[in-house]
Image (tube, rainbow, N blue to C red):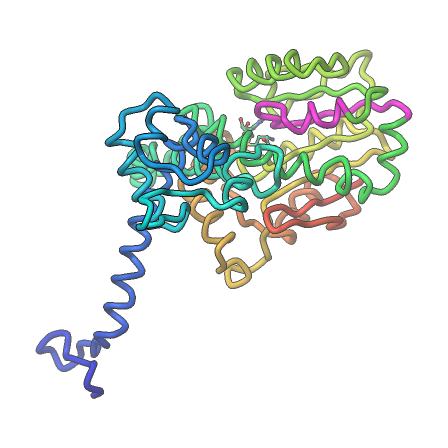
Amino acid sequence: MSTTETAASTSADAPAIDTDKLMGFVFRAVDEVGATLNAALVVMGDKLGYYRDLAAHGPTTPAQLAERTQTAEPYAREWLNAQAAGAYVTYDPSTKRYMLPPEHALAMTDADSPAFLPGFFQIALGTVHDTQHIVDAARSGAGYGWHQHDSDVHVGCERFFRPSYHANLVGSWIPALEGVQPKLEAGALVADVGCGHGASTILLAKAFPNSTFIGSDYHAESIRTARARAAEAGVDNVRFEVASAQDFGAAPGGQRFDLVAMFDCLHDMGDPVGAAQRVREVIAQNGTWMIVEPMAGDHVEDNLNPVGRAYYGFSTLLCTPSSLSQEVGLALGTQAGPARIRDVTAAGGFTRFRSVAETPFNRVIEARP
Ligand SMILES: C[S@@+](CC[C@H](N)C(=O)[O-])C[C@H]1O[C@@H](n2cnc3c(N)ncnc32)[C@H](O)[C@@H]1O
């Protein structure tokens, strides 16, 4: 036994405990408790305008931050100290001022940047908010629907995914699909299924004014927000309707869709095979089904990394309960991986399947009849 090992108990079979390993694990966990609280601090800083204020000004005292954001100084002070301890801001003891480095300012304040982070924290915190419901559901085997969650989940989802769509969708994902861009430029009929607040639908509608876009989602509140977002954006070649993925697509005159898109939602559905069958029914014979799913490999061991960790967390608390709340309840999981997605498309009657693009967070798949 090494000097750092002690017997865990008097039992002869009890494993020896390496005290260094134990304390290493405990201190890692202390950091994670800080990180857990930091999710709320980031959302607080985003909602109160602390990051935007720090980004707009140089080194700042708590009193200055409080005054400029019209918040109470003790909150500004303790928030700044927590941010400094987490290295989100720097602290200069000689001036007692705090500063947000320019790279952090970009990630915390520029909602168009693919590095934008507050949406990621907002959806995470909204998800954690509903933990007790998931604890209960795990005991009973029930699900917990997307529509039942705190609004931070819905708004955070939009704010998390939109920067990546803004950076990639029109410039690289659409061009990666075989023959789709020319169709969209000429004028195509497009369905965006499970569109949430319609971030992807509106980006596409703006980029391809000759095409018609129909966004749909089973969550009525999300569709109301999507309609408001479209009005704000001034796009008139898009409409939104409440429909599930298993029965969307009543196109005008029974016209078939040239492109059906699903962004980060197939794995949330209870019946993804039913959705695939519905896509097959309403898609043109030479049409394309674009499936954007979280980045994942086919095997658990492929996903044991920081992105996989976040996504398995969302899978447990958000996506799998969503699937289990619906008919069939297939529970694909957020990290299903391309092989299982291919099985779903094949079961729906699609014969061709290709992974066409990827980012650290998303894999883009093309399925064709
Ligand atoms: C993670 S969100 C993605 C939203 C949006 N596509 C985006 O990328 O921002 C998943 C979406 O799938 C929707 N959804 C879940 N099950 C559905 C179903 N069976 N039919 C239609 N939409 C569904 C949810 O309401 C939610 O808006």
Give coordinates of residue 178: x percent, y percent. 85, 42
- The quadrant in which residue 241 appears is top right
Membership of 64 in magenta stretch: no
- Residue 140 seen in the figure: no
Q: Is residue 95 above or below residue 21?
A: above
Closest to the observer: 304 or 282? 304
- Residue 293 seen in the figure: yes
Q: Quadrant of the C terminus?
A: top right
Question: Where does ligand 1 appear, by image quarter?
Answer: top right
Q: Quadrant of the N terminus?
A: bottom left
Identify the residue at image location x=35%, y=30%: 64
Identify the residue at image location x=41%, y=31%: 50
Identify the residue at image location x=49%, y=27%: 154
Q: Which residues are magenta?
A: 186-206
Give coordinates of residue 232: x percent, y percent. 64, 13
Q: Is residue 352 above or below residue 4?
A: above
Give coordinates of residue 300: x percent, y percent. 51, 59
Give coordinates of residue 213: x percent, y percent. 75, 21
Quick check: 365 left or right of 50?
right
